[in-house]
Each structure stands twice: as C-alpha cells, then as structure tokens.
Image (cartoon, rainbow, N blue to C red):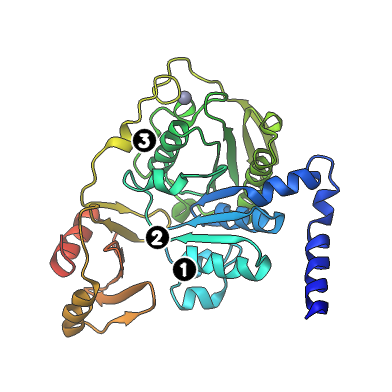
Amino acid sequence: MTHTNDFRSDAMQSRYARQTVLKEIGEAGQKKLAAATVVIIGLGALGTNSANFLARAGAGTLRLVDRDVVDWSNLQRQSLFEEEDAARSLPKAEAASRHLKRINAALCYEPIIEDVNSGNIERIVAGASVVVDGLDNFYARALVNQACVKHKIPWIYGACLGTYGIAATIIPGVSACLHCLLPDAGEATTPPLSCETVGVLGPAAGVIAALQSAEALKIMVGNSAATSPYLIHAGLWDNDFSELPAVRVSGCEVCGQHKYGLLESGSRMAAASLCGRDAVQVMPPAAFTMDFDLLRETLGRIFKLEENAYLLKFHVNGMEVMVFHDGRAMIFGTSDPQAALALYGKYIGG
Ligand SMILES: [Zn+2]
C-alpha cells in the first residue's frame, strides 16, 4: 500500500511539473487553480476542448453544463466524445465528465444536464471563479452576460462558425460586456447561418477554445491584468488573425445601469429550434412537475419506448422524441416550434 501511495504522490508531484515551472503559474498559481471553480456552459467543440485543457491543467472543480445528448455529427470536432456515447445517446455533460475523470481523477466534476434559462442561470454560475462560453446561441449568451455582470464573475465569450471564430474576455466593471459589444444579442433569433448550414472547421473551434482556456487560466491564477482587452478574430482558412477594439459603452444597460431584464423574465412553456440539428427543444416552466413513472406507463401503452438513465425516447409521425426527467423534451425531425409544442401537449403534458 505504501508503494501505491508513494507512486500516487510522485505522480501528483510530476503531473503539473511543466506547468508549475512556468514563471506565469508556479506552485502558487497551481494551488489557486486547485481551489478554483470553472463553469463551462455548452459542451460542443468550444466547450469540450476547453474542458480538456482545463481538467488537464488542474482546475479544481469543473461544472459542465449542456442540455443535449451526443450525436454522430458531433464527433468530427467535439473532443472527449466517442462513438459509444453517440450510439447510447448519452447526455454530453455526463459523457464529458466520465472521460475527464479518466484523464484527471483528482478533480471535482459537476455535470448539469439542463437548458440554460432565466430560472437557472444564476444557480449555474454561482461560486464560479470564471465562466467559459461554449454556447451556440446569443440569447443564452446574453443571459450568461447578465448573470455574470450581476454577480461580478469574469467570463470568456467565444463563438465559432465556418472556418473562423471570435473570443473576448469580459471582466465585469473593467472591460466591455457582451451588451456593450452586441446590444441586440438578447433579442436575436437563430440566424439563417448556423453550424448546420455553414459547417464548422474543427481546428477553428480548437483555436478559439485554446484562447478561451488560456484567458480562464490567467483569471484563475489571479492575473486578470494579463487578459486580452480586445475582441480576437481568428480566420483559419484565410489566415486572418486580428484584434478588434472592445470598447466599454458608458451607460450600457447591463454593465453601466445594472438592468438585468432577461434574468427577471418569467418562465413559460418555451420552444426553440436547436442550432445544427433538425430539432426543437420544448422547455416546461419551472412550476411544471413531471411524474416520470406515470409518463413512462402511459406512453408505454402506445409507443415502443427506449430508455437510459437520463431520458426516454419514442418515435411518432416520423419524429424522434426524447424526454428528460425534468420534463424537458427534444423533438428531432422538425424545426417548427409550434408543431413541437403541439406534440408535447398531446403526449407529455403542459
Ligand atoms: Zn456593458
């Protein structure tokens, strides 16, 4: 046993050797990393690559948030996921945690299989040292911005489409917030350009995730002053790397006037089409209570159900429906929110 313990303690000593020898991090920085909590919201190409960097670097607690399950089309660019995860429709947050535990077992992982909305975003970012954006839509980013500015949590904006991507570090009260940069983000609907219609080059997302991870490390070791004050643009096919000014707007509604309208908007039955999937998510209001056993029993009388530990699945009218334990559903084979709401009302409730 002593040998095992010695081996493990030697392993712990050497695990971070190439990082603690960096004068920018050192032993003191490594201790701060171990005490830090990073929240990664969205586990697509950006989020999984960031999670991989930050777990290997030794960020003490990783809260991993995603509403979706692993799909075959994810494997081209989303590190951490494997064919088996797609075959089993595993939730991304759970699959990512499982793989990261095999990479660095000493860390604390908090998988959260939820849609980000006004009802849960403040709980999701609570206690974070830094939040990393791996989202695919601007409404959710606007929510993250309001929650992070309100609670003075730094966050790293990142987005990727086609062969280019952008990143910016948002330190509340210091740098421009997302509302300063994109005031209409909260009202934005899914644009005609999406990863489904335009595609995503894996390495472009990798570059943006690497930038985001480095910025997150600077913040976690206590050196926010070293973060970039610019909006960084990286075009990997046309080799265009540039820094654009990110100017803080005086009187900005969010970071100047501290108005957090999106956080206060009430919850209701909501449907939204998902970027990159021929699918709609239906999200019941917070007050909605789901009797999952009853649902399984009633649906089981009319459909052939498939189930894993997180969701049940059935097919109707050429569509595939997945229902999670909290009542949230994803309906594949349609991009029409009204049709999805109608189907939800008919078979699930609400
Ligand atoms: Zn602002």
Which residue is label 2 attached to?
277
Q: Is residue 139 left or right of residue 175?
A: left
Which residue is label 1 attached to?
71
Q: Residue at x 63, y 44 (%)?
A: 212
Q: CA distance from mark 1 to mark 3?
A: 27 Å
Q: Quadrant of the N terminus?
A: bottom right
Label 1 residue SS: loop
Cβ–Cβ under 8 Å for marks 2 and 1: yes
Cβ–Cβ under 8 Å for marks 2 and 3: no
Residue type at mark 3 is Gly
- Looking at the rendered image, the disc whose residue lies closer to the viewer, 1 or 3, is 3
Q: Earlier in the sequence, mark 1 or mark 3?
A: 1
Residue 77 can be seen in this image: no
> In front here: 227 or 44?
227
Q: CA distance from mark 2 to mark 1?
A: 9 Å
Residue type at mark 1 is Asp
